[in-house]
Structure formats: structure tokens, C-alpha cells
Amino acid sequence: MENKPTREKLLREFAPQIERISASSVLWILFLLGVIGIGVYAFVTQVTEGHEVTGMRDNVVWGIYIVNFIFFMGMSYAGAIISGALHLFRTEWRKPIIRMAEYLAIISLLIGPGYILLCIGRLDRLPFLAVYGRIQSPITWDVIAISTDIFGCLIFLYLSMLRDIANLRDFSELKLPKWRKKLYSALALGYTGTPEQEKRLKRATDIMAAMVIAIAIIVYSVLAWIFSVTLQPGWHSTIFGPYFVIAAVYSGTGVLIITMFVFRKIYRLEEYITRKHFVAMGVLMVVLAALFGYFTFSDYLTKWYGSEKNDENLIKILFSQYYWPFIFSNYIGVLVPLLVIGIPKLRTINNILISAIIVVIALWLNRYLIVVPTLESPYLPIQDSRPAWAYYNPTWVEYALTAAGVALFCLLFTLGSKFVPVMNVSEMSEIPKSKGPFTEEESLV
Amino acid sequence: MKDLQKIVLIILLLALVVGQKTVTGQEKKDTVSEITPDLKLGYLNTSNDSITLTADIFVKRETGNFALQNAEVEFTASADKENKSLGKAKADVAGTAVLKLYVKSGLPVDKEGKTTFTVSFAGKDKYLAASGNVAFKKAKILVTFTKEDTIRTIHVKAVQVEANNEQKPIKGETVNVYVPRMLSNLKIGEVKLDDNGTGTVEYPGALVGDSLGNIAVIAMIEESDLYGTVKGQSTISWGIPKQYYLAEKPSTRELWTPIAPIWMIITLIIMLTGVWGHYIYAVVQLIMIKRQSKQKKDYF
Amino acid sequence: MDESNEKKKRSRRDFLKKGLLAGAGVVAGGSLIAAYVDKSEKESGEKVRALTTDGQIIEVDKAVIKTPRVSIKESHEGIPGRKFVMVIDLAKCKNARKCVEACQKGHHLPKSQEFMKVYLLQDSDKSAPYWFPKPCFHCDNPLCVSVCPVGATYKRSDGIVLIDNDRCIGCKFCMTGCPYSTRVFAWKHYNEFDEDKEPYSPEAGSPGKEGTVSKCDFCPDLVRIGKLPYCAQNCPMGVIYFGDIDEDTVTNGTETYRFSELIRDRAGYRYLEVLGTRPTVYYLPPVERQFPVDRGFNDLDENVKNRYKNTPYVKSHKK
């Protein structure tokens, strides 16, 4: 029971986050709901008037919906891999941020698949995926993989929240309505921290941490294979599986840094999330930046060097029509984090945040550049007098639904942080050191 | 209650008036533009005393040709003053009315042995009456086969039937020799008939027959002024047995087949059992945690 | 014993195959006046029931051939004992677009959906431009079928790749899977779909359905009654040949050739053979052409003409 004081202190400090919803957060939630409302209207428009309201046409059959799908799924896998790996390696600095990574995993996993549903012309026939499912189709693999992943992430999140839920149940000072307390008590499964319970929980969490990493890699590779099993120039690449996994973790690191920054500001967590956490995540981001740059380079180098007719054509388009997005996503998006974190002087929280934002935008553009230009340059040249058929331009419906997804992401994060503290209280309180939850020696991995 | 009845009555009356208006409107439209349909008569003599008459009935409009489905046409056979009705037929969905005759004798013939076939449409609604006719002499073509060493020969013999039912050879006509295929006839030769009304053509070989190797050979006088189209047909087992596509099984690695390759199913099952096994293990741990708390109720 | 069994099996298949085409006409015996058998009346009577009840004269567009439609189950199986093939003679094509128009009319398609597309191709700067009509290639290793998650697109025993628009969920994976940009999507409900009042059949490929994928289907409904696909029937130059490859015969309606001889004598090839999709559409190279390529620009709609304005050939001409 020697941890108790720390835990109580932490709980007392986090209690306001859970107990009250401030006026500003009500406004924030209302704003998010408004954005989601516009998205719902856009969705209804798309369903009633047909997919013609989108910018997708017979050549570019998948637009920013699929880009968002890849992007959100990527964040999810990043959350899973980061939280799983940090947990397994027992990294000390993970403790204040691991809950955010877990939230990131599950929340984006709930939003991502929604975007692939938006690409589907006949939503009324979704049950056919199960009724007539064909194992040969990568879409079937994806359906199986994503549903497996959702269950895995939910179990993992629950396992890692269990001790905190039990804490909240036992924390008598918490001023909450009765139903909330009852909910905590039910969800806590009567966990009281007996040695045997602790042993079982640890065992289950370790196994799920490993599973979540493995599944994330498989699922994201499956997603990559949706593209690379086709014969389209620009997609038909053996490197896509690992490339997508790395890109996913890379973008997820960026999102996690932004999340850390936001929660740190809102909930005043400066004491717990310090510059060192940002630097640690930044270092992780640099490693991934290098890997991402390496994969991107390999992919385009081989296309460029051999210069098969269609590959050459694709590269020509990327360096003409898509010049700036291409430069931004594949040069700036790699070099900025390398410089900012590579030079110790530049490693301020704000700089790391800015490079994280650049990484997130760059990676979204990277997916756009993988999906759209390829579809705009098929084997048989597009010969069409209708500009919309030849070139993809997203419409307001697609933008509205993209914004709605981001809003839903923020909303779920907000609500999640109101349910259980955004920091893993029980893990943080395990350290009996008086200095606080974080020590010098443990700063980097 | 009375009001309701009134309303219902008014609605009914209104419906009646409106309904009538639309009906009369349609009738007017129908009678406005009368049009004469085109009627084309086709003639095919298949040598086995059977004649097929086909009548194509359609109207020409600016937007294209339109077949007159359900139009009833009458076929007649005539020669000199003799006139026999052969029967009536209705045009099908493609505007074609077909009449098959099986005749050994009895068709009216003129001095040259010709019979005039007429098809007539009596006219109906806005479609005016129309007719068409052809006049042909009855003829027959016989196809036989011989084989000497490796040379296989197709023999064609053509005769015409005179007014007195006497059969005489057809001289000098061109007979085309075909092999019938699913969508058309494949030409394999041409015969110029000699004075005996016969001719030969060498069988070209390497032709696919049915799955038993049977192959039909057709000899045809086509659209002759005197005989119309006359066809003779015979079957011989000289064809190459047809190999069915179905018999070739796709390689086990192909992915488009309805059932997935076995290795794929196995891999999937192994992966899924592996993953879900671990899930179940984790959930079991949670259940055990719950159970242990129940055993130690006194802890609270 | 085995042999005779095999023979029986085979002849049964032949019977099935022949039975399919026998509907065209039946002969019956008897003396003259009673001799005729008005088969057509009976036949048409059945068809009439589907369209009208009172036997009134109806005008049917001759360009849109109506055929009795087989059930969805039957249309998944294919025409027994057949394997279809198409040969397109590039030397004769002058971009008259009659194939496209007839196909759209026959399948009740809007102008924006083309099952048959005509490209102006030029393999390299100095090589000759040519018109390239492109239907679905009905590949023997169809990637579109492999990737379909619900089996809505399938390859039949007669080699035809069809789409069941009652099953398609509209995920468009097949559209990215096809390297020939063959497939089209119904981005909304087009009015033309309503022209077809008959029940849906994958064989007829009509009426189209919003939110699903469709494509060239080799018109198996026409082939079943012994007619050529719309494109082959309506080509004024006889560019498109169609037939059964196992019978080694193709026809464009006026000329009939042995498939093997045609391919041998004219050096027929398949487009993008390197992709390994094994198409069942063969092309005859554009040699000794009957028309200069420029003839293809005559009598085109402005928006169709504009399609080709970015091709290297048209660009170089403008200079």
C-alpha cells in the first residue's frame, strides 16, 4: 500500500477532468456536433442523390474517402503499435502518454472503416460481405482483419484501463452521479489488486500487447495489399506492405504528439508531460521519418530507374501536376523532423509540435499521391472530354465528411478523457520515487 | 358522415372525367398518322419437302425501324388462277412471322413449275394494308460423301421439280458448301453444277465437329431467281471431336474461381484461430479476475 | 464400357447445346392446308404475355432486340459447351461509333456509360496512330473476378465474365483491379435504366442499377438465340468478329472465318499480353488499312471529338 499516497494525489488532481464539464468544453462539444451534423447532411445527400455528388468518377473511383480510410487506420495501428511496444518494453516514459496511444488506436479504428463504407455504392447490401464472402478478395481479408483488430484493441484498452476504473470506483471523494459510479463498479470487475488478480491482469495485458502489435502489422499490410495486388502502375509494388506500416506509425506518432500537446494545455499536465516526453516521441518520430524516407525513396527509385512506360508516366505526373504536394509529402515531411529533432538546440516542445503537424499533413498528402495520380494514369490513356472524368476534384460532400470524421475523432477523444483520465494513473503511481513519475535516466527508451 | 360521402362521390366523378379524357386523347393520337408497313417475304427450301416462309413486318420512322409485334399476316400460294390460303401467323417480338410448310405435293404450280407465295397484312388501327410476294420453282439438293485413301470428297446433286412432278437436274447453278456454326455458316467450298446437276468439293480437314466428331455439311443455292434459296444437308463423322473448355481445369493457383485455393483457407484458419485463441485467453483471465473477487467478498 | 459412357456424356452435352438453338423453328408433317404449323404464334404468344395482355400491335425498336431472359441462376452458369472469342480488325475501324451507339441502345445505357470505348492509340511518337475499339476482354485470368468480395462478378463456363447487379455492393475494387479501364459505375439512377421494363438479368446486363458496376457482357442473351452482340451486328465495316473458339469459327455477320486461320494469316495478338490476364479478345493489327486514320474524325459530336484533342497525334497535327 505504499503507492497509495501518490495514487490519491493523482486521482485528486485528475478528478476535475472527470467530474465537471466546463462551459468551454460544452461549446467545444457543440461545435464538434455541428461539424458532424454537416457531415450527416452530406452523407444523406450522397445516399439520396447517388455518388454523383462526389468528385469520384469512372477513372478515379476512389478519392479522399479512401485516403481518409488509410489515414485513420494508420493512426489506429500507430496507436496500437506504440502502446503495445512501449508496454512490452516497460519503457518508463510511456506512462503519462500510453493511455492516449490506446485511445488513438481504438478511436481512429472506429472512424476509419466508416470511410470505406462511404465508397460503397450499395450500403443496403453490406450483409452480402458475410453471406457471399469470397476468401480470395483482399476486401474480405480487410473485413476480417479490421473486425479482429477492433476486438483486440477494445480488449487491450479495457485491460489497461481496468486498474484505473477500479481506482475511480474506490476513490470516495469523486463527485459523480450515481450511475457513473455504478458503471465504474460494474466495469471494474471486482478488481482489488490482489496478487493473483494482478498476475492475471499482467499476463493478459502482455499477451494482448503483443497481439495488438502483430495484428496491426497484418491488418495494415492487408490494407496495403488492396492496392498492390492490382496491376495498376504505382500500386503494383511488393514494398507496399511494410511501407504502409511504417507510414502509419510515422503519421500516428505525429498525431500522438499533437494529442499530447493539446491535453497538456487543456488539462494543465505540464507537471507530468514534460519536454522529455516530447523529445522521446520526437526521437521515435525521427527513426520513423528515416524509415519512411527510405521506403519512399526505394519505391520511387525503382520506378524511376527502370522507367517502364507507365511508371515513367506516373512519375512525370507527380513531378508536374502534383509537384508541390509531392515535394511537401516526401521531402519536407521527412526532412523537417530530421532537422528539428536531429539538432538538439531545436528540440523545443513547440518545434516538435510543428514538425508533428507537418508530418501529419505530409502523410495525408502521401496517401493522396498514392491513390489519385495512379488512378488518373491507367494503362489505357484516359480519353474523355469531361474534365471531371479525367481529373479528380473532391466536392463539398467529401470535404464535409472528412471534416466530420476529424470532428468525431476529437469528440470521442474529449468524451474518452471525461470517462477515464487521459493518463494511466495506476501505472504512474507505481513509481515510489519522490521526484515524480519521471526520472532523468529513463528519459530515452 | 354525409360530407364524407359527398367528398368520395366528387372524387369518383372527377376520376371518371379525367380518366375518360386521357382515354379519348390516346385514341386521337393513334388515328392521326396512318402508316404503311414494310413487308418482306423470305423463302427457304430445305430439300426435305419442307419450305419455310418468313415475313418481316416493320415501319420506318425517323428514329429507326420498328417491328410490329402481334401484327397478323396471311400466307397464300398461287399459280395461274389457283389460289390457296396457307394460313395466318402473328409477328413475334422481332416483327417476324414464320410459317413452316411440309409439302410433298398439292402446291399450285404454273406451266414452268413455279409457285407464287404471297404474304399480306390486312391493315389494323393506324397501320395500312401491305403485301409482298415471291415466285419460285421447287428444287432439291442432295449431299453425299466419299473417301478414297486420304482424300475425302463432298458430292452435291441438285434437281428441280417440273410442273408434271418430273425431276430434272439443275445445270450451271453455283452451289455454296458450308459447315454450320453456332452463329453463322463457315464456307468450305463452291461448286459449279455440271450437266448432270452434280459437282464435288474436297473436304478441307481440320474442321471441328461436335464432341463425337460428327459434322454437318450444307450445300446451298442462294437467292436464285428461279429457285429461291435451296438447302441440302447431311452429316458425316469427319470432324475433329470438340474439346470442351469446361474440361480444362484451371490451375490450382488461379484466384478467380468460386472456391479459394486450399492453402489460402488453411492460412486464414491458422491465423484466425491463433489470434482469437489469444483473445479468448485474455477474456478468460478477466473472467477469472471477476471470479476471484467474488470469492473474496469480505475484502470490501 | 468407360468409352461408351464417355460418349453418352458427350452426346448429351451436344444435345443440350443443340437444344438451345432449336427454338428457331420446328417442322411438322401433314397434308397441305392443314400442313402448316403456326409455331410462331405460340411462341410470340408467350412473349406477348410479358409485355401486353390484349394482343394489340406494338412497335418494337428493331435496334433493341428483345430476348427471353434466363434466370439469374442460369446466367451464372453459362451456355453449355461454348467458349466465346472476339476478334477486332483494327485495319477496318474508322471510328464510326455505331458499335458504341448500338450497345448503349441495346443495354439501355445513358450517354455517359460506354461498355465499348473507342480509343485513338499511338504506341510511340513515330509509330502510326490507329482507332482501337475496346470491349471487355473477358480474361481467362480475370483480376476483377479475383478481387470481388461477394462473387458479384464471375466467370462462366463459356468464358464470359458477367456482373450480377443484384449482388454487387459497389465497392469498385474490380474497377481498380481491371488494368483495361473496362468497367463503369452507375453514379446515379439514370433515366435510361427505366426504358427497360423487363425483369433484371445479368445476361442482358439491363436494366442498370444505381451504385453498382457494369461493363461489356458479350451479349450472351443475343448469342443464346444465335445473334451476334450489338457491336458486331451494327458495325458498318464488319470490324468485330465473334464466335466459339472451340468451334474455331468467328463471324462478323457477313464473313465467316476459321479463327485459327484468321489469327495466323493476319498476325492476331492480344492487347497487353504482358499483364498475364489472358484476354479472349484478339486484335488484328492495323495494316493495309481501308481508311486513313483522319477519317475517324468525320461526323463526330463535338464532345466526342474533344476526347482526342490531348492525344499526341492530334496535338502534333495542330502544330
Image (tube, rainbow, N blue to C red):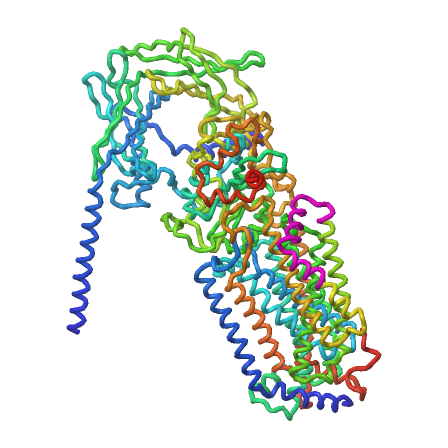
Choose between C113 and A15: the one closer to the eye.
C113
Left or right of A232 on screen, residue B141: left
Instruction: Give how far across and how far down residue A65 sits, in percent.
Output: 57, 61
Left or right of C16 on screen, residue B37: left
Instruction: Give how far across and how far down residue C311 sits, in percent.
Output: 56, 42
Q: Residue at horizontal 41%, vertical 16%? A: B142
Instruction: Give how far across and how far down residue A413 sits, in percent.
Output: 61, 76
Quadrant including the N terminus of chain A: bottom right
Which quarter of the picture shows residue C47?
Answer: top left
Q: For the magenta stretch, what is the residue range?
A: A303-332
Chief SS of the magenta region? helix
Is residue A323 inside the magenta stretch?
yes
Q: Is any part of residue B136 visible from this angle?
A: yes
Q: Is residue B33 above or below residue C194?
A: above
Which quarter of the picture shows residue A327?
Answer: bottom right
Q: Residue furthest bottom?
A: A173
